[in-house]
Amino acid sequence: MTDIAPTGHREETTTEVAVNGGHGEATTLHRVVVRFAGDSGDGMQLTGDRFTSVSAAYGNDLSTLPEFPAEIRAPAGTVHGVSSFQVHISDHPITTPGDEPNVLVAMNPAALRADIDRLEPGGTLIVNEDNFDERSLEKAGYTSPSGGTINPLEDGSLDGYRVIRVPMTSLTKEVAAPLGVKPRDAERSKNFFALGLVSWMYTRPTEPTLDWIATRFAANELVAAANRAAFLAGYNFGETTEAVGHRFEVRPATLPAGEYTSVTGNTALAWGIVAAGQLAKLPVTLGSYPITPASDILHELSKHKHFGVRTVQAEDEIAAAGMALGAAFAGHLGVTTTSGPGVMLKGETISLAVSVELPMIIVDIQRGGPSTGLPTKTEAADLNIALFGRSGEAPLPVVAARSPVHCFEAAIEAARIAVKYRTPVILLSDGYLANGSEPWQLPDIDDLPDIAVPFARDPNHVDADGNPEFWPYLRDPQTLARPWAIPGTPGLMHRVGGLEKEDGSGNISYTPDNHQRMVDLRAAKVAAIAADIPPVEIAGDVDAGVCVLGWGSTWAAIDAAVERRRRAGDKVAHVHLMHLNPLPPNLGDVLRSFRSILVPELNLGQLARVVRAEFLVDARPISKVQGLPFTSRELEAAIEGAQAS
Amino acid sequence: MTDTTLTSKKDWASDQEVRWCPGCGDYGILLAVQQLMPELGVPPENTVFVSGIGCSSRFPYYMNTYGFHGIHGRAPALATGIAIARPDLDVWVITGDGDGLSIGGNHLIHALRRNVNLTILLFNNRIYGLTKGQYSPTSEVGKVTKSTPFGSIDPPFNPLAVALGAEATFVARTHDLDRKHMMEVFRAAHDHRGAAFVEIFQNCNVFNDGQFADITKKQHRDERLIDLVHGEPIRFGANRERGVVMGSDGQLRLVDVDTVGEDAILVHDAKRDDPSLAFALARLSTDDHSPTPFGIFRQVVRQEYASAIGAQLAQASERKGPGDLAALLRSNGTWTVAGTN
């Protein structure tokens, strides 16, 4: 099951042994997980991002997990100020950012303290030893009960790891000094030293990073020169010193032929919205209020005005939703993006959208809750509010993305349902998908679905005197959608609102029978969408005893865990939901065909409760609410347990 | 297709039965709007009335235009969405003192700040009518209502001062008993490019009857209704014998014209960029029993929001060409995998 490379890198998916690559001294690995950790100001996100980009361009499959504190500048050197970026690169298809890093780069004692427990036993630890001074050790909490500090580099506590001590700060200052860079400024380049060193260790090409430095810092030659010098110094440090030892290579993955790019979930989602507007032949209007971890979608969409995308940074979450709905009334694809706390504020507008039956997309990039919770950490505990968080009977379709790349497709699907059925749709993603990135084999634009629907142009009814008139709630018998008649259309003037309206005419009506009919109709309209979504497919073994049922970002960890159990000889099935409401039409039958159903969720069992209620099956929740995604190992253990029971 | 030149008042009235209380001031406002609309030259299908919640917010149901009866306080947000999506439309917002200044205060001030092309009519009756008689954010201190049996202790908002503080470019006041004045003010508000804010003193004859009677009833208008006309001295009274002066301390005072001389009377300037005069005029009266200015307080030109969005869109298209989805997906850089190896 595991193979041990010279540094103790452990394979997760293969039984093959690492082979000498025949590329000089480099040993070939199938995969590696590197984690860069440092202070918030140390540039770890940028470092991880560069390593990722170079690896993507090199042809590896990859998956990333950026983690950063909620504070913009948490107190320097403290554990809660640690910012990390984990990246998993491989020569074969992978889905997760890796359970345990094989390599941890710790730029200071706080980063070491925060992340050392994640490093695999025997893993490689690269530390910037310049930062292990008394003061930094104290700030990181490496203190002795009897007073004074304890240096973990000296006390034997790291004996289980391969520790590489590098004076990164002083070496960086040294190479930057001849360039005329002040020591304080030079210190800022030390992350490039780390990047250079790790780039050497994993035989990454240097040109892309050097080119990137030249472009990115074109405005400041001195900074560009310092970063370049630091990067090369790190690279050369690996090459010329004995300290680092062996080099490794992770060859390009055997991905399907095609053109690839690398995207984060939020970028893919924003592009999906741009695409949805084009495919629906509707201009996009986005109302949004900044909120972590959704703000990047607002940023991205604000760039694309040449697609006719209008963006407004509204005064609050409520107005953001209101603007989107107003734009929808006027004939645009109305979108609002937020996280859980914002969904709560938008609830009233979403209820109104249910009542006036207009299309609208509400994007919820979930984060840890309740309340402000863990703004920068992931969780998927908003399923309940997405399904039920409104006054009255207010059902609406809910769609969830399963991977960063899938956010693109999920956004188009949310738009398709919204415009076809004239309904608000909640699109769920989460902090992990939002910031995580992976390679994306670009779709052929011509293969994307046409989701355009016609606006109403003509009267659809006659009054008692035989005169044509327009009934805004006279439904399409197939979809039960009401006509979408936009202002500017002569003869179709009508009024909509949150008051109950008469079936057909749309006039205000408080009669008992009509309200029953309208509540039933709104529910039937959404329920009938089940016939317009694909049935669930079973991944893995159809004849398995155990089925893992997932939704959203748990897909990667479930997929890896299920595959591993299957390789170990177990029969396991994986069913993953993109549509949370309505549920796929065959889901009940599929679930009933398994002895045991496990539902891993980053909440306390919200989907499990739904399927238990809906299908009377014994679905067992597997919960994790730590602000982190599941590791595949955690799920593998749960599957093993279920197999045994 | 509606011929705009031929619409009459009845073309603008919907077939819905008007359900305000008999005697409500809202009827007069509805009539003024319906009578004005044919004169504005905009066809009904290009007109949208948006409202929040409250008695006044039923207004859109009675207009034969496109209408959106929204949620409490959120009409400016819905209307902003409509106006930015469709600058070709004529968008009106109907709100009240509770809807616009309490639950929806935030949206109102930001719509004004952005200068979205909206005509906002705020029906101020200083009471909550639809919920049957609680005090509102414009109720006077001491007001006894169901929720303030010992008298309200909340200092009220001055709607015009709020609008001016929010950088509104058009601020006016009228009242429900003078259809001609309403129509004049509404017309100017409609013609204003940007957010136009109109406060309408409106009588709630059920829960707050006669609140403005001391000013707006015909027999009191000479004494207490100060008609503001841009470029003209601010005078009132049966024989225009009273006027407004500005003291050296910047304070506005009511004076007898004879005492100070005609030249000392303040000349109204609605088009001054500096809003301090409009602000002072808005605060000239602090109760509903003293001389109170009506008309257009402020009317200045500033870029309208939807046009600004449109300009950025046009600029982006000019610079980058029309949106190309295939290019967008490649904007992070790409690499090619030749085939499985």
Image (spheres, coloured by chain):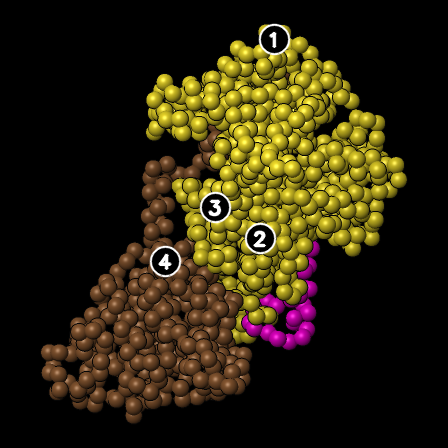
Chain colours: A yellow, B brown
Q: Earlier in the sequence, mark 2 or mark 3?
A: 3
Give the residue pinned by disc 4.
B114
A252 w.r.t. A415: above or below? above
Seen as rendered, the residue at the extreme bottom is B219
* Residue A538 quadrant: top right
Give the residue pinned by disc 1.
A25
**Gap in Å between the C-alphas at discs 2 and 3?**
20 Å
Question: Callout 4: helix, strand or loop?
Answer: helix
Q: Nearer the viewer, mark 2 or mark 4?
A: 2
**Gap in Å between the C-alphas at discs 4 and 1?**
64 Å
Question: Callout 2: helix, strand or loop?
Answer: loop
Question: Callout 1: helix, strand or loop?
Answer: loop
What segment is highlighted magenta in the picture?
A503-530
Name the quadrant of the C terminus of chain A: top right
Residue A531 shows in this picture:
no
A503 w.r.t. B178: above or below? above
Task: Specify the label residue A298 is tagged with.
Answer: 3
**Gap in Å between the C-alphas at discs 2 and 4?**
29 Å
Residue A570 shows in this picture:
yes
Most foreground residue, A355 or B120: B120
Was residue B197 drawn as part of the magenta stretch in this picture?
no
Give me the chain letter of mark 4. B
**Gap in Å between the C-alphas at discs 4 and 3?**
19 Å
Horizontal and vertical percent for residue B20?
49, 82
